[in-house]
Amino acid sequence: AQSVAQPEDQVNVAEGNPLTVKCTYSVSGNPYLFWYVQYPNRGLQFLLKYITGDNLVKGSYGFEAEFNKSQTSFHLKKPSALVSDSALYFCAVSSSGGSYIPTFGRGTSLIVHP
Amino acid sequence: NAGVTQTPKFRILKIGQSMTLQCTQDMNHNYMYWYRQDPGMGLKLIYYSVGAGITDKGEVPNGYNVSRSTTEDFPLRLELAAPSQTSVYFCASSSDLGTEAFFGQGTRLTVV
């Protein structure tokens, strides 16, 4: 069975500092990896994805993520955090060898302090 | 282009009542999903559909039913509401398996 782990319930960072939100996964076959963001009382919005190709993926709002096959990780990063980045972030995985239906992590609350 | 539309946004049910959560998408997506979100638990898949007339159970299907008579609509039915079904429900769709999902704004359901 495929699974996703987001080891941090909450990440705190000062505005202007770089941020990292961690995600590790377990799948059979090749992974399809996604990051979504959820603002209060809203649905999830797609940020970026890795399917194949370059390990560094760039997405919306200046976010990027690095696929690391050996560490089975897909950490979300941003060079300079904004207060408006404060939200709930979800990592999700599906796979070519297992379930195509996305499995979501538990979410990480990102808080950016002014 | 409305994307994925869910109704209602909020609902309070009494134990034992039934209701249908509506979900419609206008992107001609074949794949549709229902998730529930509980605090600190992430999203749990209830049911999914890979096309009109085809549905299948997800991780937490007990107490729910779905139908998919058209590509656009994927309603979720609660027959006998229980307090354990208090949650936020999200409908989502995608164009293909392995592609990003588009989510509705959610239905916040409270069972009392």
Image (cartoon, rainbow, N blue to C red):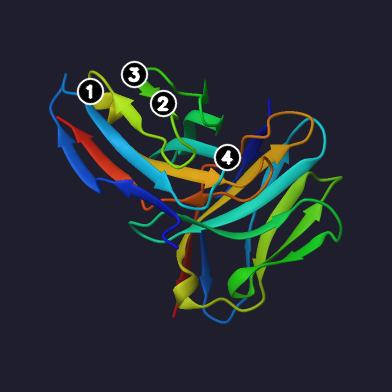
Q: Secondary structure at mark 3?
A: loop
Label disc, if present, on residue B67 of the rendered structure: 2
Q: Which residue is mark 1?
A: B81
Mark 2 packing: few (<14 Cα in 10 Å), some, or many (20+)?
some
Q: Are marks 2 and 1 on the same chain?
A: yes
In-image side of A109 versus A73 (left or right): left
Place of residue B23 in the rendered image (x, y in percent of width and height, measured from the top left): 37, 42
The quarter of the picture where residue A95 lies is top right
Q: Which residue is drawn at the image coordinates 69% and 56% (left, top)?
A: A49
How many dots with numbers?
4
Q: Inspect the image, locate mark 3, and give the three-letter code of the amino acid beneath it.
A: Gly
Give the letter of the chain under mark 1: B
Give the number of the mark in front: 2 or 3.
2
Q: Which residue is mark 3?
A: B63
**Which element carries disc 1, helix, strand or loop?**
loop
Amino acid type, residue under disc 1 in the picture: Ala
Give the residue at mark 4.
B30
Calculate the distance from the C-alpha at mark 2 to the C-alpha at mark 4: 14 Å
Chain assignment, label 4: B
Q: Earlier in the sequence, mark 4 or mark 1?
A: 4
Chain ID at mark 2? B
- Compared across the picture, whether B67 is left or right of B32 comes to left
